[in-house]
Amino acid sequence: MPDWSYQTIFRPLLFRLPGRLSRAITLHAIGGLSKMPGGSFVVRTFGHMEPTPLLKRELAAISLDAPIGLSGGVDPEGIAHRAFAQFGIGFIEHGPVTVQGIRCEEPIIKDTVREWLQYPGYYENDGAQRFARRIADPGHQLPQFVRIAPMPFASREQSAIELVSMMEQLSAAGADGFYIDVLYGARSWEDASAILRNFASMLQSLHYVHAPLFLYAPPNYPNEQLLALIETAQNGFWSGVVVGESVCVEAGASFGCIVSKAAKADSLSKIKLLRLACGPDWVIKAGGGVHEPQDALDLLQAGANAIMLHSGLVFAGPGLPKRINEAIIFEQVKDQRVEETASFWRHWGWMCLLGIGMMLGGLLSWIIAATTVLLPYDLSFIGMSLEELHQINHNLLHFMSHDRITLSGTMITIGILYFQLARHGLRHSLHWARTALLTSGIVGFASFFLFVGYGYFDPLHALAAAILFPMFLLAMRSNPDRVFRLPVNVRNGRLWRRAMWGQLCFVALGFALAIGGLTISAVGISEVFVRTDLVYLDTTSIGLNESNARLIPLIAHDRAGFGGALLCAAIAILITALWGIQQGSRWLWWTLLLAGAPGFYAGLSVHLSIGYIDFWHLSPALFALLLYILGLILLYPYLIRFPKADAVMRQAQKEND
């Protein structure tokens, strides 16, 4: 459920449902997918958050792959933790956890305008025993922190006993650290202070070597009282403080909580206070009000070491961790010297030449298909002349021209995509661009062997493949990934939301073209014709075969080749749409515009010119054209405009290009 589908389709539908139901549907959907065979690959493919050393952190002697964590309230039952672990987060929180489970059936209330969630029961959870089983078998390798709390209204002594008991039980299960949560609910400062003193004393008397401990505090907790509580334990007892994301509210006889964007202001104030009072070595985690990447950057700039996500995932979407990570990376590299790009002949230049070769080959093929249609070796294979073919069926040459012109337009599309992805992506060692070229190229060259379906070997096709394939291998040589250096989007503004619709259009276009390519290839090496083809030709497969047994293999070769080329282009478009949409990437918008034009023009114009205008036959192409045009319109403001950032970076990028 990436942002381009969440913001456009799923969020509007889910927000119409009761809060508990929409949460259950979402978590079971992504959690169930991650547990299916190949499901984790699908999650990684759609999210594509590759780990990078630039995000690694060492906090309280615990290594994190990223400074972004998942708050316990997002998925209290751990249904989708396996999937969330692939969204670009570095750790997972469980809790609050109490000794005994606490149930609550009251509805979860959400306010989409002010972006807040109200939970009716702050302490609602399954109990320590179930959490221990969950932690012991998490389905992922991320560090797990547990927020433990005494039972509501437990005595001071009993509260400390419960905290120690849960620590022992959950440590044995594999918990990496604990958040001590005694400041929520109805407890006074005196109660909280006494509980913490008893808790610290019990741990000391037991000589218990415990995991890192963090004091968990509401973002609106009084500053003087919080600092006093920190000092109740001996030096070295606390590893840091977690500034929680929720504010307690009375909900009947119990206590609920509100998690909202508005908590950011209190979180910033608390972080600055703690950093000033506790020094640079203390670990501070914060989770209040992070609904867009800029919120996370602000909290980190204020002094937080790590961020926890809760309501932001609900309102912004599952892509928020990735967007935050990209913003963090950019902040780290924006002032660094721009690395020199590799020389033209190192790798990317070969892909540019391959793209140029595809464009020239497509143009030459188009000219032939629009004039003689068949080459001498084609006529030699079937043992007939153009006049004899025309006598067999007056539409036959038109039909074969239509196949070859659509193939030619697709070849030009591929050439433009490859050239641009090489010049602007592979040249700067962008991982997604290299993956798009590698995957698309493998499929494209492998499609050459589709001729085995009917046995027609095209010598010109073979010669082109023999010339271009070494270029492909040279382009795919060692090419270490580099980070994307253009400014990234950090706001959930109108342009971003509109761009999600544009991205959805191009993702749908990529899938549609891939399905079309697979279908055409399968038909080409099996049945060869669809019903509308035979209606246009006013004949049957049997009739054509009886007139010349080699005629259908020749047509099948053209059809299968077009299907393979279409699949090749579709993969490049799909990966670009999934992973390459970044605000300010002007070159990408122009690439999509220029690459799509020859393919659509070839496919639609040739049908009109030969009179093959069956609506059902053309409807897939018209649908694809609609997605293409809408996608370009919706993405234009987002890709053409740079986000606000240092002008030096823009100039550096221009110089690099």
Image (cartoon, grey):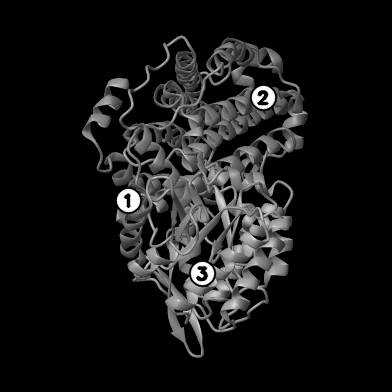
Q: Which residue appears at 57% of the width and 53% of the height?
A: 212
How far apart are the alpha carbons under marks 2 and 1? 53 Å
Residue type of the residue flagged with mark 2 = Ala
Q: What secondary structure is marked by label 2?
A: helix
User: Type of residue at label 1?
Assistant: Ala
Q: Is residue 434 left or right of residue 631?
A: right
Q: Marks 2 and 3, how far apart in space?
A: 42 Å
The numbered dot on residue 302 is 1
Q: Decide if residue 394 is in sight here.
A: no
Q: Residues within 10 Å of mark 2 (few under 14, many from 20)?
A: few
Q: Place residue 327 in its image quadrant.
A: top left
Q: Is residue 363 left or right of residue 548?
A: left
Which residue bears the numbered disc 3?
14
The residue carrying mark 2 is 446
Relative to 20, residue 632 above or below: above
Q: Earlier in the sequence, mark 1 or mark 3?
A: 3
